[in-house]
Image: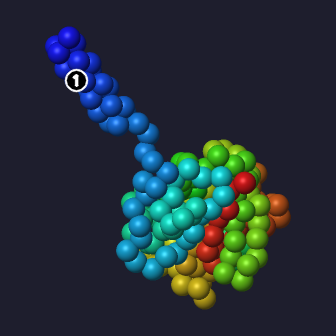
Amino acid sequence: MIRTKKLLNFVGTLAMALLLIAAPASADSLVAPSGKILLTVTGAITQTNANDAAEFDFEMLQKIGVSTIDTTTAWTQGKKTFEGVSLKALADTVGATGAVAEVVALNDYKVDIPTKDFADYPVILAYQMDGERLKIRDKGPLWVVYPEDEHPELKNKETQAKWVWQVKAIHFK
């Protein structure tokens, strides 16, 4: 009887350890930002680091992965090189489940962008243009950028309305 109890205790402990190892990350698995917060993500997300939100500083955005788009825009002269985080990768990082990303600018301008755009095109949240960090006066610190030159079907007023600059927040719904 003692052997059976010990065996059951061992099996139970082993099962719990395996569950902990195999368990998905908890809802609070994102690290907290150590620098200035550039972006707050809320809504239908599973990964947070501040109450019901995911806050990101510059270094955290870079760690998700750097994506580059070379494209012309309606607001700049000539072809520009934009660097930033893929919005698909950002959505995956926060466990976004919404079909729409409401992107909010510093002046509270809001645009709903279907998350399907992030799957169909390599849309980025740019933090650099031509090697320079975007400043508020240059449409920064974050700017939604579509690869219009690579995908000519995106050169239209509907897509241009989604090029939100001075982004401060994204709310998935």
Q: Is residue 135 above or below residue 19?
A: below
Secondary structure type for disc 1 = helix
Q: Which residue is mark 1?
A: 10
Q: Nearer the viewer, residue 43 or 76?
A: 43
Q: Relative to residue 42, is residue 27 drawn left or right?
A: left
Three-letter amino acid code of the residue under disc 1: Phe
Q: Nearer the viewer, residue 77 or 165?
A: 165
Q: Nearer the viewer, residue 61 or 86?
A: 61
Q: Position of residue 156 (x, y in %)?
A: 81, 60
Q: Is residue 60 above or below residue 152?
A: below
Q: Residue at x 36, y 31 (%)?
A: 19
Whether residue 117 is visible, yes or no, is no
Q: Quadrant of residue 14?
A: top left
Q: Residue at x 58, y 56 (%)?
A: 87
Q: Relative to residue 147, is residue 93 drawn left or right?
A: left
Q: Position of residue 114 (x, y in %)?
A: 74, 52
Q: Position of residue 118 (x, y in %)?
A: 64, 50
